[in-house]
């Protein structure tokens, strides 16, 4: 099975005045197409820095990041933005939806940047909403939806461009346990359909849904377990 993500000796150094802080200290791992990976670790362990690099929101100080075979380190900001839109789908803890906009238009947003016609956008957005069980809610605004429904809209938005990878950052952090289980079951079903998912979480019961768990501590990987 081919790798959709490959990190080799990734280091990320932040300058704070005349001090330097090494957030990632030579991190290497790869993710195969169709894997479901949970990235775990305490606050300050480096997992969020790693997620920002995976999401092309930040670049490593050194090392190589290959996303779907493309070396990310050589790209300029416009190219990075294009890669984010085409190759990645994002799901955040806070949903990040436009409040006064119908669900279907929130889902369409990545397609606007991709230059699709309004008819194509609507068709793809409706199909994505159906995948997450929100048929009939397409015209509801965020304020008319529960937290779980809002996260389903966010997942549909992440799916709509048919990305190579979905990156989920604490996707159940704002949800009660029952709703969290519903959302994680959606991720599990999407993964069964072959979608690659990488999720940051600090909750062991949420990480248990993933087939593989990578644990960070002090900028290094200290565990990588499957099953």
Image: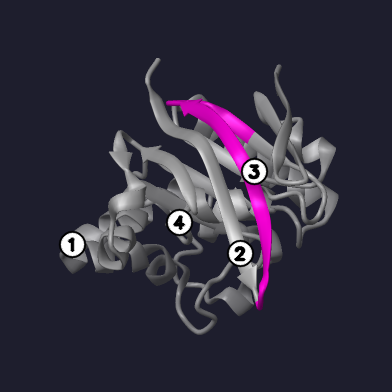
Please report the residue visible at 40 percent of the width from the left and 15 percent of the height from the top: 1
Q: Is residue 23 magenta?
A: yes
Image-based side of 25 in relation to 35, left or right: right
Q: Which residues are the magenta region?
A: 17-37
Please report the residue visible at 33 percent of the width from the left and 36 percent of the height from the top: 68
Q: Position of residue 101 (x, y in %)?
A: 46, 79
Tell which of 55 and 49 is nearer to you: 49
Q: Earlier in the sequence, mark 3 or mark 4?
A: 3
Q: Which residue is mark 4?
A: 59
Q: Which residue is mark 3?
A: 25
Q: Main secondary structure of the magenta part?
A: strand
In the picture, residue 111 is in which quadrant?
bottom left
Q: Earlier in the sequence, mark 3 or mark 1?
A: 3
Q: Secondary structure at mark 3?
A: strand
Q: Secondary structure at mark 1?
A: loop
Image-based side of 58 in relation to 122, left or right: right
Q: Which residue is mark 1?
A: 116
Work out which quarter of the rendered image holds the C terminus and state it.
top right
Crowding at label 4, few (<14), some or many (≥20) Cα neighbours within 10 Å?
A: many
Do the residues bearing badges 1 and 2 touch, measured as CB atoms within 8 Å? no
């Amino acid at each position: 099975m081919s790798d959709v993500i490959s990190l080799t000796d990734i280091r990320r150094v932040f300058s704070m005045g005349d001090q330097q802080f090494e957030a990632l200290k030579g991190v290497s791992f790869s993710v195969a197409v169709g894997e479901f990976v949970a990235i775990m670790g305490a606050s300050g362990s480096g997992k969020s820095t790693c997620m920002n690099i995976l999401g092309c929101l930040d670049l490593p100080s050194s090392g190589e990041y290959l996303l779907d075979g493309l070396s990310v380190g050589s790209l300029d900001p416009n190219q990075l933005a294009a890669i984010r839109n085409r190759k990645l789908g994002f799901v955040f803890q806070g949903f990040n939806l436009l409040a006064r906009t119908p669900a279907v238009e929130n889902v369409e947003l990545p397609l606007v940047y991709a230059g699709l016609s309004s008819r194509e956008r609507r068709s793809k957005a409706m199909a994505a909403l159906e995948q997450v069980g929100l048929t009939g809610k397409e015209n509801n605004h965020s304020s008319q939806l529960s937290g779980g429904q809002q996260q389903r809209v966010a997942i549909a938005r992440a799916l709509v461009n048919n990305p190579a990878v979905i990156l989920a950052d604490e996707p159940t952090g704002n949800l009660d346990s029952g709703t969290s289980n519903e959302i994680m079951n959606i991720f599990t079903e999407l993964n069964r359909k072959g979608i690659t998912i990488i999720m940051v979480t600090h909750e062991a019961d949420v990480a248990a849904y993933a087939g593989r768990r990578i644990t960070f501590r002090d900028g290094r990987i200290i565990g990588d377990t499957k099953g």
